[in-house]
């Protein structure tokens, strides 16, 4: 049996409620992540497969786990909700690998003291979406929670209709959220705010432990700010819209966390709103950087028993420059530039503007740009732009810019292909896998997970997965109920 540790549990019962999972009857595997299982040294396939199936469908907990529901609160769509907590998920404990330690969390495990009106369950549809998104982002190099496996069985739950339920084993560096701090701050449990901050420093931010005691928490907050800025810069550079950036869905370690109605951009539209309940566009794609800052302000406020106003302000001032520097570096890499030049920012924004005007496919446009040769007169990409002349003019400026680089076209092309994915998790691809899975056939899910695990490689047998979405596939609206 895996050696599961209980560092979070050792914080004491102010931080959680011990809770047992409620089983899904007659369980089976939907999908198992062989690579991650291997990294974690969990034998999901052979001798212990039945034991794990039983644990991860809620029937019989692993003898070494101590399941608990964490308490937190958070700002949801800007409004403070004084108590949330794990209403349908349980932290099973932490598992150590050679150089790291990860939380194991069972999502969809049944009611907990924090379930409020909910049933404690997760539907198969959204569990598949979470499984795929975490793996897709991870393969793109974006910090994200991951998924070890999905189970299902004889259980259906009511959303807008009757739907099959599932359980997902989430693997994350941490399940501490911005909202975890908010809960203790707004209930005036300042000793617990400190205890939680110390826990985060000990486990995730050891550099902050080397600071003077006056600087310790400011340094911690600054590191959270930088990690969050990097994560959001990458979302923007790869066209990922999270959809529900409530503070309870913001991880303290800057991992993409809690997948609901997220979406990867098909057509480039900065005002894209993936969550159909987000009527004001609070969490629109282009709003993510400023919402990140809003959420960090909320976190800063909840650390105000440890930090003075000036420290909070100084730390928050790091956010924007850090995000812009990360985003610029990613965009430079996407365009094949090694050095930074003055005209870069204008070239990037002019390209995005042309793409927006034409509704160009975000992922395919960048991938195709890698095949531009420095002395081509034209490039076939022009035909996907409504403003072909505008594209030609931009191309000429881009080529001038490329001449300042010292790499050959071939070297640049392979560098660009290593950062511009060929395969992304388009909504319609997920939808196809879900429809089949709901009929009990998981082959498409397996195949899609395989394709997405190597987003930058040319996988010739999977050429169809790199095509633009069909028209029906662009208009899938994702329900918030999951
Ligand atoms: P989410 O929208 O998934 O980030 O969840 C927000 C809050 O609602 C969290 O406290 C969840 O645990 C809780 N929640 C979401 N769905 C359910 C459910 N089906 N049953 C119980 N609690 C839920
Ligand atoms: Mg959540």
Image (cartoon, rainbow, N blue to C red):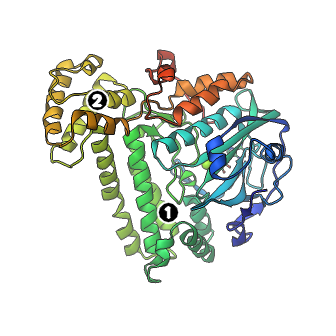
- Helix, strand or loop status at disc 1: helix
Q: 42 and 424: which one is in front?
A: 42
Q: Mark 1 points at which residue?
A: 299
Q: Where residue 364 appears, x then y in whole percent? A: 37, 27
Q: 243 and 106: which one is in front?
A: 106
Q: Where residue 360 appears, x then y in whole percent? A: 34, 24
Q: Where residue 80 appears, x then y in whole percent? A: 56, 56
Kindly identify the residue that appears in the image at 74 percent across and 47 percent down: 43
Left or right, residue 155 beside residue 96: right
- Helix, strand or loop status at disc 2: helix
Q: Quadrant of the N terminus?
A: bottom right
Q: Where residue 85 appears, x then y in whole percent? A: 68, 56
Lower position in the chain sequence, tag 2 or tag 1: 1
User: Image height check: is 326 above or below 316?
Assistant: above
Residue 35: which quarter of the image? top right
Q: Name the residue under label 2.
A: 369
Whether ligand 2 has any atom under 8 Å from the Cβ at mark 1 is answered as no
User: Image height check: is 56 above or below 204?
Assistant: above
Q: 200 and 398: which one is in front?
A: 398
Is residue 70 among what the camera can see? no
Kindly identify the residue that appears in the image at 24 percent across and 46 percent down: 338
């Amino acid at each position: 049996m895996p050696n599961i540790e209980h560092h979070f549990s050792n914080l004491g019962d102010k931080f959680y409620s011990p809770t047992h999972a409620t089983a899904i009857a007659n369980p089976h595997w939907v999908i198992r992540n062989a690579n991650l299982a291997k990294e974690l040294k969990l034998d999901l396939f052979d001798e212990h497969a039945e034991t794990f199936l039983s644990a991860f469908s809620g029937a019989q907990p692993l003898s070494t786990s101590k399941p608990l529901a964490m308490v937190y609160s958070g700002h949801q769509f800007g409004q403070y909700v004084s108590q949330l907590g794990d209403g349908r998920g349980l932290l099973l404990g932490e598992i150590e690998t050679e150089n790291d330690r990860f939380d194991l969390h069972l999502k969809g495990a049944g009611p907990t003291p924090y379930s409020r009106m909910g049933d404690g369950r997760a539907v198969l549809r959204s569990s598949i979406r979470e499984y795929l998104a975490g793996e897709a982002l991870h393969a793109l190099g974006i910090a994200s929670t991951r998924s070890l496996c999905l189970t299902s069985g004889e259980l259906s739950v009511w959303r807008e209709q009757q739907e099959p339920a599932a359980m997902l084993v989430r693997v994350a560096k941490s399940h501490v959220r911005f909202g975890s701090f908010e809960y203790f701050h707004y209930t005036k449990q300042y000793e617990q705010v400190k205890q939680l901050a110390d826990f985060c420093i000990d486990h995730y931010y050891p550099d902050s432990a080397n600071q003077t005691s006056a600087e310790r928490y400011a340094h911690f907050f600054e590191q959270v700010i930088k990690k969050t800025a990097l994560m959001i810069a990458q979302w923007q550079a790869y066209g990922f819209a999270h959809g529900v950036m409530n503070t309870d869905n913001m991880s303290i370690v800057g991992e993409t966390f809690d997948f609901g109605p997220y979406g990867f951009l098909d057509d480039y539209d900065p005002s894209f709103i993936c969550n159909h309940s987000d009527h004001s566009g609070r969490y629109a794609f282009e709003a993510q950087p400023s919402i990140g800052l809003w959420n960090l302000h909320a976190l800063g406020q909840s650390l105000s028993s440890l930090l003075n106003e000036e420290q909070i302000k100084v730390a928050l001032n790091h956010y924007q420059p850090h995000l812009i520097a990360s985003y610029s570096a990613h965009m430079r890499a996407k365009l094949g530039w090694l050095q930074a030049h003055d005209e870069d920012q204008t070239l990037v924004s002019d390209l995005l503007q042309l793409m927006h005007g034409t509704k160009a496919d975000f992922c395919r446009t960048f991938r195709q740009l890698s095949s531009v040769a420095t002395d081509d007169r034209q490039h076939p990409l022009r035909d996907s732009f409504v403003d072909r002349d505008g594209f030609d003019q931009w191309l000429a400026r881009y080529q001038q810019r490329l001449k300042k680089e010292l790499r050959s076209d071939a070297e640049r092309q392979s560098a660009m292909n290593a950062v511009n994915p060929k395969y992304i998790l388009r909504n319609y691809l997920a939808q196809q896998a879900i429809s089949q899975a709901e009929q009990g056939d998981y082959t498409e899910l397996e195949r899609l997970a395989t394709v997405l695990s190597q987003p930058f490689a040319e996988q010739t047998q999977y050429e169809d997965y790199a095509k633009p979405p069909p028209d029906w596939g662009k208009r899938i609206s994702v329900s918030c109920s999951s």
